[in-house]
Structures are given as structure tokens and as C-alpha cells.
Image (tube, rainbow, N blue to C red):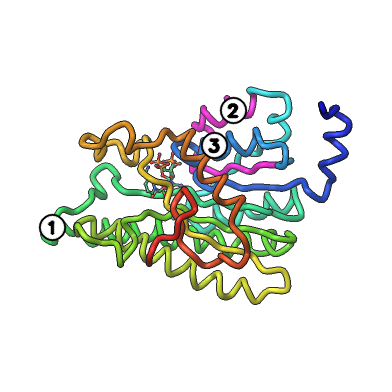
Amino acid sequence: MAVSGDQEKARRSDKEMRVALVQGASRGIGFHMTRALLDDDRYEQVFATCRCPASAAALEALRLSRKRSQSQLRVLRLNVLDEETIAEASDMVEAQTDRVDLLINCSGVLHADGLLWPEKRLADLRAEAVDLAFRVNALGPLLVARSFESVLRASQSARFVALSARVGSIGDNRRGGWYAYRASKAALNMLIRTLAIEWLRLPRPVSCFALHPGTVATDLSQPFRKNLSAKQVFSPVKAAEQLLGTIHGLTAEQSGSFYAYDGKPIEW
Ligand SMILES: NC(=O)c1ccc[n+]([C@@H]2O[C@H](COP(=O)([O-])OP(=O)(O)OC[C@H]3O[C@@H](n4cnc5c(N)ncnc54)[C@H](OP(=O)(O)O)[C@@H]3O)[C@@H](O)[C@H]2O)c1
């Protein structure tokens, strides 16, 4: 039987409406997560953060693309290397909502012009590169957790997600190389696990997850995809759809774990 618009509205009580925040939403997986959340009727408000809103043309086009998303989407400045911007973004979110039900950290760095390139061997290691990888990939999401703790705690069942990477698994490391990136994602996994333990003790626990998106056709993976078949690489649209499906299916009992895009656990 067809469901009328009013019936549909009634079915979605206010209680069910959710607020999401995507950190690192200017491009790649984060941008497509934002787009998918805007398309999801359960999300009444979506905050998207990026380092430079003024040049985030894709996010602005997305905001203007539909009448609903003009009020539903708010784009805020946040650079995980700058604690002041994290605090400012959380103040702005707190001014506009009483809670955040889902916070997804998508920012990450594998290579950066002249600063960082995945090492093939120990001789390639540069301290500044390791420092950048750790600050963006590991410390960044934890600083975000600290600033957004109060809005997450205000939700009945908040989820805090960080995009990690399978290469950050210590048990699964069979090929070596990529010292900075691997170690920064392993550190991220430890921080997520530690945070999950602390947040499980809250009166309203916040669940924390580290997720591997698979290999996804974005700027980050572009230099390393040459030998992969089309089947081995997901489009960012598909990756966002898979990750959100998995995120919505995860339960509080699974908090503090590392999962792939398909919901399969990954060893630490
Ligand atoms: N693509 C893959 O195959 C793959 C595989 C495994 C894991 N991952 C992980 O998935 C996540 C998303 O990757 P992606 O493929 O979508 O990468 P991407 O297309 O290169 O996008 C990276 C995002 O991180 C943001 N970012 C970089 N430095 C930042 C900083 N200091 N502060 C705030 N934001 C910053 C970028 O913003 P700007 O636009 O301002 O640079 C951009 O939005 C990353 O954590 C990555 O490690 C990706």
C-alpha cells in the first residue's frame, strides 16, 4: 500500500530526526558522505567542515542544489592542525543545535606536495613527514572528539567515526613500507579504542568506530591505483553508501572496534 506524505511525516517523529557532522567534507569520501546524508530523510541537519569554506565550490553547489539542503547544510571552517578552528567550529555547532548524533572524521593525508610521500624504505623516512601524518591522521580526530564531546554526549545514542585504513592494521601488515601513514593510522586506531572505553562509561555512552573505506578513487589514492583493476577500486559515491550502511548497522556493543566498509572486523 502506498504511504502518503503525511503518513510518512508522522512515521518520522521528531525524536528520530538526527544531526550529523562530517569533518573533512571538501572532497573525496567526506564530500560524498555529506551528499548521502543530505539525501537521507532521517537527517534534519548536516554540518560539513573543511579547511577553506570560501574555496569549497563543490560543497556550496551541493548546498544550493536543493531547497531543503539550503537550510539543512551548514559549512564551517575546521583545520585539524589548528586547534582554534576546531574550538570555533564546535562553538558554532553548539549555537545551532543541542546535539550531534553522528560525527564522521574523513580528513586524512597520505601524500602532500613536498611534505609527505609514502616511504618505500627506511632511508626515505623524514621526521617532518611523520609528524604531519600523525598530526592530521591520528591527533586530528582526537582533538575533534575533545571539542565536540558535549554535543555528542547530548545525543541519546551518538556515534563517533574515524576513517582509518587497513594498512594501519599491525596484524595485517605483510608488505611493509609507508611508515608514516601506517603508523599514524595504527595510532588513530589506538586512540579510538581508548576513547571508546572512556565514552562507554558515560550515562549516555558515545560509540566509537575506526572504519576502513576500501580503496576509493580519490586524490589520496590516485598515485597508487595504476595496478588495480576497476573491481578493486570503489567510486567515492559507492564508498560513502557502503560506509553509511555499515555505520547505521553498528551497535553500541561493537564500539571500540575496527571494521571494513562491509562490516567485517579487521584485526588490530
Ligand atoms: N581513498 C582511499 O583509497 C582510502 C583508503 C583507506 C583509507 N582512506 C582514508 O579515508 C579518508 C578520506 O580519504 P579520501 O580518499 O577522501 O582523501 P582525499 O580525497 O584526499 O580528501 C582528504 C580530505 O582531508 C582533508 N584534510 C587534509 N588535511 C586536513 C587538515 N589539516 N584539516 C582538515 N581537513 C584536512 C582534505 O581537505 P582539503 O580539501 O582542504 O585538502 C580533504 O577533504 C582519509 O582519512 C584516508 O586516510 C582512504
Crowd tier of the residue under label 1, counting other residues whose Cα lies within 10 Å: few below 14, some 14–19, many 20 or above? few
Determine if residue 100 is in view.
yes
Image spot of residue 125 (x, y percent): 18, 59
Disc 3 residue type (three-letter): Pro
From the image, tell me which residue sits under label 2.
62
Determine if residue 140 is in view.
no
Image spot of residue 91 (x, y percent): 67, 54
First along the sequence among labels 1 and 3: 3
From the image, tell me which residue sits under label 3.
53
Q: Nearer the viewer, residue 251 or 168?
A: 251
Q: Which residues are magenta?
A: 45-64
Q: Nearer the viewer, residue 243 or 65?
A: 243
Q: Secondary structure at mark 1?
A: loop
In the displayed structure, does residue 95 sit left or right of residue 232? right
Disc 2 residue type (three-letter): Leu
- View quadrant of ligand 1: top left
